[in-house]
Image (tube, helix red, strand yellow):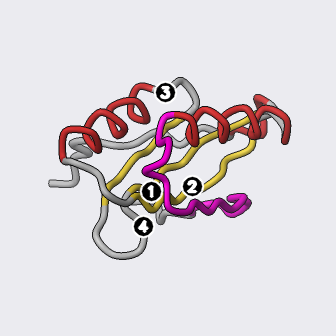
Amino acid sequence: KHVIRSFVTLPNLKKFNYQRYSFYIQLHGMTEEAEGSIIDFFVKHSFTDWVATSVGKWNIMMDIFARDVEHLNEIINEITGVCGDKLEVYSWRHRNWRIRLPLL
């Protein structure tokens, strides 16, 4: 009855000297094709582990991980470069909380 059918692994990035950040992007004047290629870039990015699209203020939300602030700045420069002049605004926050799930 209680069979685990799927799961998501959440590694402890601190053990590898990485920090997790939530990143939010608001785009403007995008065609579906252009937005799709930007999303594809984020999905394939080496330091992105979760990407979602939404309606409302933020078009794209993602979690990225970086070694330090300098590395985070490099990733932000990549993100702003890929979005170009279609980037309206972005926001990010450090994720320093842990998810606790009950044991079955």
Q: Is residue 12 above or below residue 24?
A: above
Dot 3 or dot 2, earlier in sequence? 2
Q: Residues within 10 Å of mark 4 (few under 14, many from 20)?
A: some
Q: Residues within 10 Å of mark 1 (few under 14, many from 20)?
A: many
Circle number at residue 23: 2
**Left/right of residue 95 with respect to residue 59 in the rendered view:** right
Q: Nearer the viewer, residue 73 or 52?
A: 73
Dot 3 or dot 1, earlier in sequence? 3
Indicate the quadrant containing the C terminus: top left, top right, bottom left or bottom right: bottom left
Spatial CA span between label 3 and label 2: 14 Å
Q: Which residue is mark 1?
A: 61
Spatial CA span between label 4 and label 1: 7 Å
Asked if marks 3 and 4 touch (Cβ < 8 Å), the reply is: no
Q: How many marks?
A: 4
Circle number at residue 45: 3
Q: Could you say whether the residue bearing mark 2 is in a helix, strand or loop?
A: strand
* Residue extent of the magenta highlight: 82-99
Q: Nearer the viewer, residue 14 or 104?
A: 14
* Residue at the (48%, 47%) spot, across then down: 85
Indicate the quadrant containing the N terminus: top left, top right, bottom left or bottom right: bottom left
* Residue at the (27%, 39%) spot, across then down: 34
Dot 2 or dot 1, earlier in sequence? 2
Q: Nearer the viewer, residue 29 or 11?
A: 29
| Badge nearest the viewer, 3 or 4 | 4
Q: Could you say whether the residue bearing mark 3 is in a helix, strand or loop?
A: loop
Residue 45: percent from left, percent from top? 49, 27
Residue extending furthest toward the bottom = 56
Dot 3 or dot 4, earlier in sequence? 3
- Identified by mark 3, the residue type is His
Q: Residues within 10 Å of mark 3 (few under 14, many from 20)?
A: some
Q: Which residue is mark 4?
A: 58
